[in-house]
Amino acid sequence: MSTPPHEQPIVTSQQIFQTPPSTQPQVQTTPGSSGFNDFPHVPVNFGLEDIGDFNFVNDEQGGEDIKEGRRSLEKRVKTVEAENLSLLKRVDADQAEMDIMKVRIAELEEEKARRDEQNEYFN
């Protein structure tokens, strides 16, 4: 035989914080009572599949906004691609300059080594 779990009484925030009960009457929410009389009635058992297609992409203003956004993004992509190409060309040019400098450094190190040998010979 199992014993039922001990049920704790429900404690309200008024009891916790020892605040007096509200003097305002409780508002009963019924359709149309909230002041939004023009708001359409929403059925109780209404699922997302019942909403249907909004066709906001085909809407004249929405479609134009999306087309304008797409044009703006395409323009920005082209700009970034052009900047990227320019930077890649600059990297290639800098790499070529670095290669030339490495060769020049090697030549100067050989020249220094040759002169150091001559200096040792004459000393």
Image (cartoon, rainbow, N blue to C red):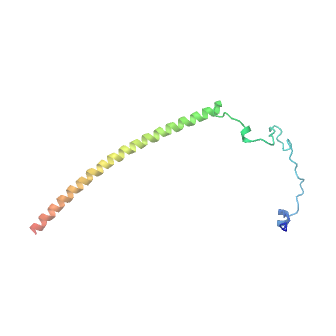
> What is the x, y in percent for residue 106?
22, 56
Extreme residue toward the front, this view: 1
Residue at 48 percent across and 40 percent down: it is 77
> What is the x, y in percent for residue 85?
40, 42
Extreme residue toward the left, this view: 122
Q: In which quarter of the image is residue 67?
A: top right
Extreme residue toward the top, this view: 60
Q: Is residue 73 left or right of residue 50?
A: left
Q: Is residue 71 left or right of residue 110?
A: right
Residue at 29 percent across and 49 percent down: it is 97
Which residue is more in the foreground, 18 or 7? 7
Q: Quadrant of residue 49?
A: top right
Which residue is more in the foreground, 17 or 122? 17
Q: Quadrant of residue 112?
A: bottom left
Q: In this view, does 26 lie to the left or right of 107?
A: right
| Callout count | 0
- State whether residue 85 is above or below residue 114: above
Picture quarter with the C terminus: bottom left
Picture quarter with the N terminus: bottom right
Residue at 64 percent across and 30 percent down: it is 60
> What is the x, y in percent for residue 20?
88, 63
